Amino acid sequence: MFKLVSGGLATLAAAAAVVLPMTFAAPARAADIDNSALSQADFRPHVRTFGLVYTLPAEVNDLLDRTIRGPLKERLLELNLVAEAVKPNIPHVTVVHVHNADPATPARMLEALPQLPPVLNVTLGRFYTTEAAKGAGRPWWLDLGLAKEGDGFEAMMAFNTTATAALAPLRDGPLPRVTGPVYAAMGDAGKKLVQTVGVSGVNVVDGGKELRSHNPHTTLVYSMARFTPELQAAMNQTAEAFNQILPDPIPVSFKTVSIVELGFAGNVTREIYRVSLTDGAVTEIATGRRLPARQPAARN
């Protein structure tokens, strides 16, 4: 599941330079992080999940709206996936999610942010379906993947490593969606991530090596319906149809990163803080108020 990145020593050194001086604002103590849900057969109840994400630029949302969102909604309704067709979501690419019922968590996340990445120029590629864990049955998603190449991708992956280290201590326990049947179906590497940082699919430094399991993508469908072979086949056909509609890579420039609140399956329900990757400026979304700037990305 993990892969060591080529050229990883330079990336790791840069990541370490960010991680070492990092300070946390009122992080959760080890005693406050409850992993008991990992031994339960059912999912941990979801209270509140917060995350750090890149929201999709308007021009990319406009393209998706004009091309595949209409056919996608029709397909979901044909398959009687009504909840999936109406589920709210602010389109985004995730950095990391943490579960914590404390409403002060977003402010603590903002305070704990590590050094920001530069503006990220990346490309979105192919549509595909994925499960939280093979054989768990649910949740599952329809995703649009991000091309794993280029300077923007490398900077995104390095930031995931440092942001995971900074924000994971703020959790009160594992993400509900990686507990119960999902945790039981995970391999050893995935289980270790959930035990130590509360979530799978992130980058960590372990034994001096950067281990990369993060798979950046934007999600179009979030579902807790049972992912039967028939449903999987239907949604795989939908993904292939969308790959024919949008066969070329979609360029994306992420100029901000946002702290958000999410539903159980990872859909963004509201944006809380937006941080500029050019100058570190912070905007509180509900009020429009400007807050003290964060440290912008280092420049060569």
Image: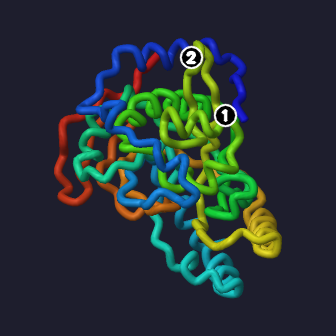
Where residue 105 appears, as percent x and y from the top left, is: 28, 45
- Which residue shows up at 31% across the image and 35% down it? 28
Is 103 in front, or is 123?
A: 103
Where residue 250 appears, as percent x and y from the top left, is: 65, 53
Where residue 24 appears, as percent x and y from the top left, is: 29, 28
Three-letter amino acid code at disc 1? Ala
- Which residue shows up at 24% across the image and 31% down it? 25
Three-letter amino acid code at disc 2? Leu
Q: How is the image coloured?
A: rainbow
Give the Cα separation between the discs numbered 1 and 2: 20 Å
- Which residue shows up at 20% across the image and 55% down it? 288
The image shows residue 82, relative to residue 248, as above or below, that is: below
Q: Which residue is mark 2?
A: 12
- Which residue shows up at 41% across the image and 21% down it? 298
The image shows residue 83, relative to residue 167, as above or below, that is: below
Q: Which residue is mark 1?
A: 189
Is 78 in front, or is 291?
A: 78
Is 29 in front, or is 70?
A: 29
Within 10 Å of disc 2 (Cα), the crowding (few <14, some 14-19, many 20+) is many
Left or right: residue 130 versus residue 37 is: right
Residue 30 visible to the viewer: yes
Quarter occupied by residue 20: top left
The image shows residue 276, relative to residue 243, as above or below, that is: above
Q: Are marks 1 and 2 in contact (CB under 8 Å)?
A: no
Where residue 92 appears, as percent x and y from the top left, is: 50, 55
Element carrying mark 2:
helix
Location of the N terminus by quadrant is top right
Q: Earlier in the sequence, mark 1 or mark 2?
A: 2
The image shows residue 64, relative to residue 279, as above or below, that is: below
Left or right: residue 160 versus residue 19 is: right
